Image (cartoon, rainbow, N blue to C red):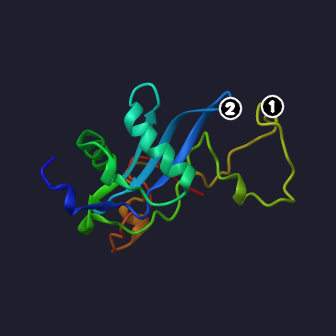
Amino acid sequence: MQMTDLALIPNPHAELSPVYEADIIRAITVRAPVRGQRLRVTSIVREKEPEVFGTLLVSTIRRDALRPAGETAAVRERLAEIGLLLPENQVSNPVWFSCDIDDPALDLIPRRAPCNDRCDPPEDLIVNPTFLHLGRSGPPPEMRGRKRLPNRFRDDRSWIWL
């Protein structure tokens, strides 16, 4: 690691999410935005990185900021690699919205919406005719006009437009 540990602070916008398998936490997914870079999404698996996993598990259970002072240099280095520890000048703004296709934001669906079995999609489903797949580069220049707007979303995903 190039920088000293004293220069690193916990990422205030990082999110830790436990990954369960048969009621046991097998991994922890870390989503850590870093200024000037993309949102870093890393899965720390218990069996592969037990020390780092233990640190993240304690932080998840306590629901408080990461406390790396008592960790080994190797653990602190890994926490810096995944964006949980970073220099103060790399603290980014919080991520506005992130949604994986296999983990939709169900809390955004109105409660009055009918519930369908996800495994049995309706047979009369059609795609909105205004649907456009824009790829990773986002809206083309003709959609943006003269301005090049900054991308507020993850740059490792494809864009769609309805």
Quarter residue 121 falls in:
top right
How many numbered markers are drawn?
A: 2
Label 1 sits on a secondary structure element that is loop
Q: Is residue 99 visible?
A: yes
Foreground pick, 102 / 162: 102
Q: Amino acid at mark 1?
A: Asp
Extreme residue toward the bottom, this view: 146
Q: Is residue 86 left or right of residue 57?
A: left
Point 62% across, 55% down: residue:
130
Residue 120, numbered circle: 1
Label 2 sits on a secondary structure element that is loop
* Label 2 CA crowd tier, 10 Å (few <14, some 14–19, many 20+): few
Quadrant where the C terminus is found in the figure: bottom right
Q: Is residue 131 left or right of residue 154?
A: right
Residue 100: x, y in percent? Answer: 56, 45
Q: Is residue 133 visible?
A: no
Residue 30: x, y in percent? Answer: 45, 47
Point 41% across, 31% down: residue:
50
Point 28% across, 49% down: residue:
80
Q: Amino acid at mark 2?
A: Asp
Residue 141: x, y in percent? Answer: 36, 63
Residue 23, numbered circle: 2
Discs 1, 2 touching: Cβ within 8 Å: no
